[in-house]
Image (spheres, rainbow, N blue to C red):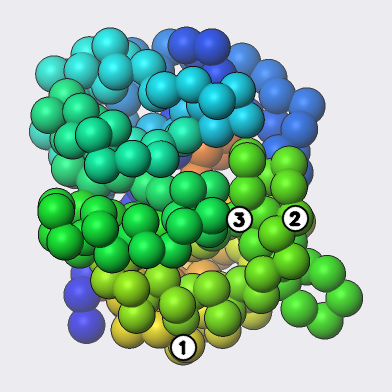
Amino acid sequence: MLAKRIIPCLDVNQGRVVKGVNFVNLVDAGDPVALAKFYNSEGADELVFLDITASSDNRKIMLDVVKLIAKEIFIPFTVGGGINNIEQIREIILAGAEKVSLNTAAVKDPEFITKATSDFGSQCIVIAIDAKKTGSSWNVFIKGGREDTGLDAFKWAKQVAELGAGEILLTSMDKDGTKSGFDVELTRKVSEAINIPVIASGGAGKLEDFAQVLTRGKADAALAASLFHFGELKISDLKEYLAKNNIEIRN
């Protein structure tokens, strides 16, 4: 079994890191470059940078910020938001990112996943799935959680794995920013349905939440934002807790 990973997420809007609840009511959480540098020194295993309004605003990711972050950190770095062609992926990787995260463009054109993995390798392509419970199932949302596609999250996860994606970043929109715990059921069902790593996102509130999603939820990594941004939990303390609970983590 691969060691589990802890990943802070920088949701960026107009050049600032923000955090909200259920994808709305955003509040300022700081400068992305300063936060990235802090997490690099704090022991984060990876970092995710999401330009959360690039897709809905129909604009490109802020490459200048990506370049500045890449210069300051020495851990793997994933960038997402509004990416819809091969050239944009190339620009982001050349700017210093190891991986790109695709959501809206992948849903609209699933073959884009195959093209991207063919050009850059599966290890570079992360598919972000923003899922919200609708009745007894979970639907996939795009455009920063603004549009319900009607797609079943489990079927979509299986499809993107078959198309060559290297990893899934799975966010529970119902849990996002609530600090009430990850959606363990959603995460487990997706993890069991596919054979590629799943990053659990949405709902981290306390140490136990990470342990649950990494064990019962079968996630390969756990992502959090506000809990780390506002100093409520230190990554070093989290890793110490997980190790004491016999969960293998990266050093």
The residue at the point 21 percent across, 18 percent down is 67
The residue at the point 47 percent across, 87 percent down is 193
| Residues under numbered marks 3 and 1 in contact, where contact means CB atoms less than 8 Å apart | no
Q: CA distance from mark 3 to mark 2?
A: 10 Å
Q: Residue 202 got which mark?
A: none
Q: Secondary structure at mark 2?
A: strand
**Is residue 22 shown left or right of residue 59?**
right
Q: CA distance from mark 3 to mark 1?
A: 18 Å
Q: Secondary structure at mark 3?
A: strand
The residue at the point 68 percent across, 19 percent down is 27
Decide which of tag 3 and tag 2 comes sooner along the chain. 3
Q: Residue furthest right?
A: 135
Kind of residue at badge 3 = Asp
Decide which of tag 1 and tag 2 comes sooner along the chain. 2
Q: What residue is pinned by disc 3? A: 130
Q: What residue is pinned by disc 2? A: 148
